[in-house]
Image: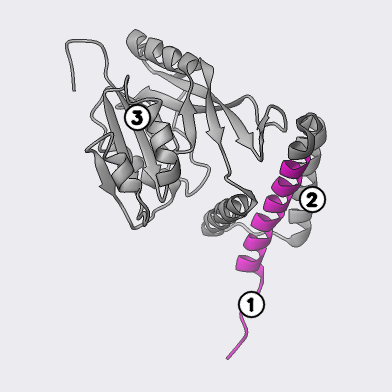
Amino acid sequence: MQTNSKPTLAVALIVKNEAQNLDACLKTVADWVDEIVVLDSGSTDETEAVARQYTEKFHTNIDWPGFGPQRRIAQQYVESDFVLWLDADERITPELQSSIQAAVAKNEPNTLYNICRLSWVFGRYIRHCGWYPDRVVRLYPTKLTQYDDSLVHEKVETTSDMQVKELSGDAIHYTYNDLHHYLVKSAGYAKAWAEQREKRGKKSSILEGMVHALACFVKMYIVKAGFLDGKQGFLLSVLSAHSTLVKYADLWIRTSTEKPKD
């Protein structure tokens, strides 16, 4: 790590079977970051080969602990002053690149930065449905903080003495390859959500799931103007409502039903 010059910047990713996305992602950062760290959780495709075209800092942790813990492990390999977190299906635009570089150069104390993601879903950029602007904290000084230990929907830990600033420009997010990819991905999130709630002693019911699912659709399609995103906005609102019902149903099955007696 450099100490007598401008602050250094690492890009960190946690991946699994992302060979089709990883090259395009890393191309948008390779020329201007100081370090790339990739933590793989057991890929069976060419993910490692693609990653090693850009970095020798390719590590594996096959014993999947959840999204938050996996990111915490990955951060242990980061040596640079700042860490920028990306997913393999994201791309940094030139405007966002300039904003990131300016923030790192300024190096304000106790400051984290969020980026805005613009998602491409089923053939269209989604600018409503509550999906845009989709701001998430992704850039911060490596020694300042880290992700929490949530199994899913993990967040960067912040305290009252920290400030979060917005970066200009978008990260393009190619969220789903197709409908099957959406269903598989959402099922995984639902499972992790239910497991996490179960460990906390929470319970649910089918009625609660139905209420939350209906509320999800109304919020996305009507309140958040998903109808302005055309057919994709309608489909995404319906699918999100379905995913909401599934996660509550999963929790209900786990905590309120019995297995057959032998």
Task: Give the residue at x 49% y 38%.
Answer: 89
Circle 2 is placed at which residue position? 211
**Residue 161, above or below 218:** above
State the extent of the magenta-drawn residues as a range.
Answer: 234-262
How crowded is the residue under tag 1: few (<14 C-alpha within 10 Å), some, or many (20+)? few
* Distance from the alpha carbon under mark 2 to that under mark 3: 40 Å
Report the quarter where the C terminus lies.
bottom right
**Residue 125, above or below 189:** above
Report the quarter where the N terminus lies.
top left
What secondary structure is found at the residue carrying circle 2?
helix
Task: Give the residue at x 31% y 52%.
Answer: 61
Circle 1 is placed at which residue position? 258
Between tags 1 and 3, which lies in front? 3
Across and down, in percent, residue 74 comes to: 32, 41
Task: Give the residue at x 51% y 58%.
Answer: 199
* Distance from the alpha carbon under mark 1 to that under mark 3: 46 Å
* Distance from the alpha carbon under mark 2 to that under mark 1: 24 Å
Across and down, in percent, residue 159 comes to: 44, 26
Between tags 2 and 3, which lies in front? 3
Circle 3 is placed at which residue position? 11
Q: Three-letter amino acid code at disc 3?
A: Val
- Residue 48 lies in the magenta-colored region: no
Report the predominant secondary structure element of the magenta stretch: helix
Across and down, in percent, residue 241 comes to: 73, 48
